[in-house]
Amino acid sequence: MKENIVIIGGGIAGMEAAKQLLVLGYNPIIIEQQDHLGGHVSQWHKLFPDMTSSHELLDGLSNQIKDANVFLETKVNSINALGDSYNVILNNGVNIVAKAVLVASGFHLFDAAKKEEYGYGVYDRVITNADLEAWFNKRADARIPEHPKAVGFVHCVGSRDLKAGNSQCSKVCCTTAIKQAIEIKEIFPETEVYCFYMDLRLFGKKYEDFYINAQRDFGVHFIRGRVSEVGETIDNRVQVKAEDTLTGKPLKVTLDLLVLMSGMVCNPRTNELAEMIGLNIDDDGFLKSKDNVYTIMESNRPGIFYAGACTGTKTVPETVAEARAAVLSIHHYLTQA
Amino acid sequence: MIDRIPSGFHPFVLPFLFGMIFVLSYCLFGIVRILWQLPKQDVRKFLLSLINPKIIVKNVWEIFRDCLIHVKLWKRNKLLGYMHSSIAFGWFMIILLGHIEVFLFVPNRIHMFYYPIFFNYFVAEGPDMTIQGSLLMFLMDFFLLIILSGIVLAMIKRVHSRFFGMRRTARPSLLNQIGLYALWAIFPLRLLAESFTAHISGGSFLTIPANWIFRQFLGNDLNMLPTWWAYSIALCVFMCVLPFTRYMHIPAEMMLIPMRNAGIKIRDSRKGFAKLQVYSCPNCGVCIDACPMSVNRGNLKDCTVYLTRQMRRGNEKRIEEISDKCLLCGKCHTVCQVQVEGPQLRIMERSRRHYNLSPDYSNIDTQPLTETASHGKVLYFSGCMSQLTPAIGQSVESILKKAGVDYVWMDRDGGLCCGRPLLTAGRAEAAKELMHKNEEIILGSGADTLLVSCPICYKMFTEEYHLPGIRVVHYSHYFSELVQQDKIRLEKSDLCYVFHDPCELGRGCGIYDEPRKLIGKSASIAEAEKNREESICCGGSLGSLTLSFAQREEMTRAALDNLYTSRADAIATACPLCLATFARYSDRPVRDLAEIIDAQSSSTQKENQ
């Protein structure tokens, strides 16, 4: 009989792990809260830096994990140790005993309304990065005007911001903002696009090229300086006040659309799960790995492994690589035992 | 009662005399010095107030109420109140009765001012016991008993302050301890001395039985003099250390009350009225529990009781730390029994700093700002903080539109700061410059009403600005009026709110009821455990110059925990800063008063037309 492996979370990490576990001859069981697999990636339109279609990527993965057991719209009610195994009870009454559990519960998008000064939920023309991706997918959002003259992106919304309760960098927003700025320019070539950033962290392969493209080929304006406040003009546009810290001058820009780059914060459901079974939580709220260099995918409990953004902010390639690494760790754990 | 000692003197009165002369001359010197340090016009004001009959009555009543009866302490905790008033009022009565006895029985000795204190030693019971005499003796014993019960409570309080409603008390310094033990010793020693003398001088229900008991195994005559000596020495020790201990608050407060009633303000953190306030601090430590910073043990020594202590010691480094850290929420001032103005002392302390750069606002052109305001009857000022919480301004505007009010939003597109942050940082001159600019705009606008939503600005406009002919109104009052005049109608929602009193609005401006009434008309309302004057600062205050973000977070969470005790679904407040601070950590929605009213109000304009 094939060994059961429970995967909590059916995002890109859980799906990739299921695929690899199937190859190794295990029986992966994915537990997903929502009614579809793919997590945050399924809400996205294209992925940087190659403008890969996220739907094609997920469709390919879905085809490869047809043999895995998937519970959609299901939550973990409780999880407890049972000898050298774990007993996972789901809210649909299903009871699974597995020697290994992979936590791939991912992250939450920061609630931009918490930064009230940016006016999300207050002004009509303020949206988030996720809203914009949804618009790229469906082209339906009353907040986005037909022919915007000027669009702004605010980087680091809820990231590297102690006052918002998150000190960590969300890693993906800089490049996502550049990607979205380029996409806006492709759709509306006449539109002026501004990016308000405090640092640009373009660490990955091709990210810097992406940035140079945005400036050279698309004419996106990059302004270093945090936005101090956002107001509304009489004609319902938004006015952004910021300081250009490179020239040392305050500036005001009136925009038709302001996109807030909401960052990644820990998933509160993950913390509930961690409390059930006694997993360590780091001071940033994410799960705490054994260490942050060599065994990121291992937890403080034998048989429980991590993959993806449940341990911290990650890009898609990092998440996928970590899912594979976690599968190998599970494999070693089970064969050695 | 007859005089027993012809000379009317015994050497044991010398320690007492020495202590008494010392403390009186110290206080006299202190009064002269404080008056000397006050500005001329303040001295005039003070001296004139002393001959104003109304103020005289007020002074006498307040001294009686605060220094002897301690009404505020009774309100806080009955045991604490009893402990203080038993000692203060009891002691006062003993001194008064002593004088009456001298006056009645040995009026020729009235000029010897140690006589009333040691009356029982110097007199002998006459052959004919009078009603007056025995009544006085009875009262003497009665008040001594009251004091002794107070001393017992004081001893218990030293070990278990929680019985007295105090979680923490200030730690007394060495001299304070000497003063404390001397004070504790005075009254038992007096009881002993009077008891050993009671077979000569007479006594009452306390001293006569004690005299009889002592006679059974101690020679009364033998112990009489040593105990009178000990009593006198205890008094001497107490009075000699008094100027250097917290007991200085006893004479200082009697001076503080008339000065406060004369309308004197702190103008310098080290001189005059401020000095008097520092000496008036009784070191009771009520402000420790009240201070929102005390959620962190590391901040315990930064509340007002330690500020006054360090100011007396002249520890410059600590004075600066304590002054800069404070949130200026004003709670210590509210709970203080003698109303030491902790926040104001700190602001004046901050104003002693010298900055190399001082801002220059003279080139700000108020003309463009004024012109935008020149059409409206109502000028709405939302304040800088509301730029960070745009929902407030938006809601106020929506309500004004519903009510059909002719208004202009003075700082919609950014305006000038009201000056409060500069003022609390001790930079009054710079604040004044900004205030003049704002006055120019407001007076030039042609409006007759200034509507303010931010309590920080509201306090400034009402207290510091000179705006003749302009009504400065807080939006809670203004919206109440709109409801009364039936310009808007409120409909009740199912939500239950708990109202958080912002420091600047509640303790700062005394507005507690209007917001509650309005919320009560638009939703149901619950109360937190600590509310109104006792409301806990949200931790976001602009007042603190040095508190770290992490420390503020702790305070915000403590303030939220207090609000959660109401079990309301949502939190309501009326300050942009409280709103932004609570929204960060609250587990339930936080709304500004304007948002709630806007959501629940409907216009009556169409019907009226």
Image (cartoon, rainbow, N blue to C red):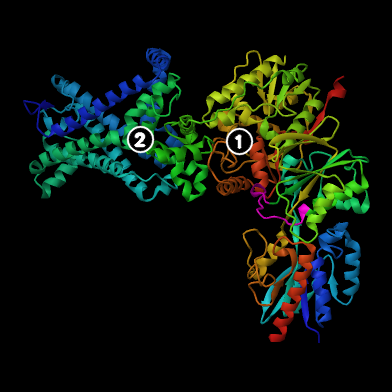
> Which portion, as a residue range, is magenta?
A160-174
B520 or B272, nearer to the observer: B272
Residue under label 1: B502
Q: Residue A253: image x %, image y %?
A: 79, 35
**Which sits earlier in the primary sequence, circle 1 or circle 2?**
2
In this rendering, would B542 be left or right of A57? left
Residue drawn at 54 percent across, 23 percent down: B429
Eyeballing the image, is A277 above or below B226?
below
* Label 1: how many Cα within 10 Å (few below 14, some 14–19, many 20+): many
Main SS of the magenta part reads loop
Q: Is residue A172 magenta?
A: yes
In this rendering, would A328 be left or right of B254? right
Q: CA distance from mark 1 to mark 2?
A: 32 Å
Eyeballing the image, is B240 above or below B223?
above
Residue under label 2: B312
Q: Amino acid at mark 2?
A: Arg
Residue drawn at 93 percent across, 49 percent down: A139
* Label 2: how many Cα within 10 Å (few below 14, some 14–19, many 20+): some
